[in-house]
């Protein structure tokens, strides 16, 4: 139960970060400007890397279910 | 037909919907199929969208309006409209000898391996100087303009090679010993210090 809840929490956090990163990426494409490029690289990219990283970490960090 | 940016927006929108679905209903990932879906939606799709976004930004950063969007570059943009064929950037721009939409990048990238990447790194430095530091006044190139950038297009062009002066100086030109922008040759470039006294072309 606890394991499932932890996984759900991580998926939620990861999903929110990825959505925020994608929103920043979409906004950065609205205008052709160097600040858009920077926002994409450092803000959007950072959020995406963090979100995907948390998801991947959640896959490898949770203990295996006990063998019967 | 929708352009690449429209397709990218569609993909971003689809990814947002799918990621939000998993984020707010994580119980979907309880099954094997749900786990596979989560891997696609939380890993493969964001990575693909980020790669496509990076490509889109790289292409946009070559655009003339991208370079000229910084205030400090405005006079350089204006110099492209000088109504005098002696001014090298202006005549290249006005006669479409370079793509107008990528005019700055075409002449100011290094035509060597990773030259484009080097130009991008310089661009990051320019943005830093624009918003955090202080840009040099007047602006200057990092190194003297290399003939290689001119020869990228002009080498082997008949009009270039058959010109008497070019033919006589070809070795010095190709070895970069004698700059194309030397005094008396093609030394009228952006001339931003004298813009106020010049006439400008007004495209119809």
Image (spheres, coloured by chain):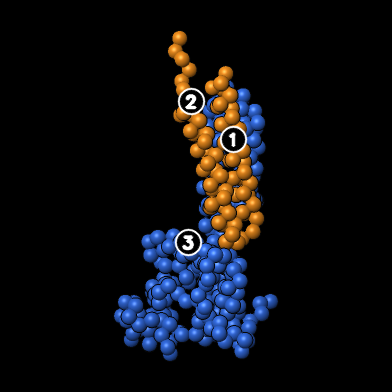
Chain colours: A orange, B blue
Q: Residue at x 54, y 48 (%)?
A: A45
Whole-number angstrom distance, CA of label 1 to CA of label 3: 33 Å
Residue B6 location, x and y as percent? 64, 50
Q: Residues within 10 Å of mark 2 (few under 14, many from 20)?
A: few
Q: Residue at x 40, y 74 (%)?
A: B143
Q: Which residue is mark 1?
A: A13
Residue B23 location, x and y as percent? 62, 32
The residue lying furthest to the right in this view is: B204
Q: Using the rendered image, report if marks 1 and 3 lie on a common chain.
A: no
Secondary element at image label 3: helix
Answer left or right for A37 relative to B159.
right
Q: Which residue is mark 2?
A: A62
Secondary element at image label 2: loop
Vertically, is B149 above or below B83? Answer: above
Q: Residues within 10 Å of mark 3 (few under 14, many from 20)?
A: some
Q: Which residue is mark 3?
A: B120
Residue B87 location, x and y as percent? 52, 83
Q: Earlier in the sequence, mark 1 or mark 2?
A: 1
Whole-number angstrom distance, CA of label 1 to CA of label 2: 16 Å
Q: Nearer the viewer, mark 2 or mark 3?
A: 2
| Callout 3: chain | B
Secondary element at image label 1: helix
| Callout 2: chain | A
Question: Quarter holding the C terminus of chain B?
Answer: bottom right
The dot on residue B19 is none
Q: Quadrant of residue B40?
A: top right
């Amino acid at each position: 139960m606890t394991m499932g809840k932890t996984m759900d929490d991580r998926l939620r956090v990861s999903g929110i970060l990825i959505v925020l990163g994608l929103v920043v990426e979409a906004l950065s494409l609205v205008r052709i400007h160097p600040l858009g490029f920077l926002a994409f690289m450092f803000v959007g990219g950072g959020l995406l890397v963090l979100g995907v990283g948390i998801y991947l970490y959640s896959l490898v960090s949770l203990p295996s279910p006990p063998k019967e | 037909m929708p352009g690449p940016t429209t397709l990218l927006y569609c993909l971003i929108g689809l990814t947002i919907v799918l990621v939000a679905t998993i984020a707010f209903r994580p119980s979907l990932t309880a099954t094997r199929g749900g786990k596979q879906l989560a891997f696609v939606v939380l890993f493969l799709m964001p990575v693909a969208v980020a790669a496509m976004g990076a490509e889109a930004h790289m292409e946009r950063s070559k655009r003339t309006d991208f370079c000229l969007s910084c205030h400090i570059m405005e006079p350089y943009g204006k110099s492209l409209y000088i109504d005098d064929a002696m001014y090298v950037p202006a005549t290249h721009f006005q006669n479409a000898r370079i793509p107008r939409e990528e005019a700055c990048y075409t002449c100011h990238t290094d035509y060597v391996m990773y030259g484009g990447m080097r130009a991008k790194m310089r661009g990051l430095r320019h943005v830093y100087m624009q918003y955090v530091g202080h840009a040099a006044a007047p602006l200057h190139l990092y190194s003297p303009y290399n003939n290689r950038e001119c020869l990228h297009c002009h080498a082997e062009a008949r009009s270039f090679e058959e010109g008497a002066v070019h033919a006589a100086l070809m070795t010095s030109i190709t070895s970069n010993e004698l700059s194309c922008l030397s005094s008396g040759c093609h030394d009228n470039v952006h001339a931003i210090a004298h813009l106020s006294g010049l006439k400008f072309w007004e495209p119809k």
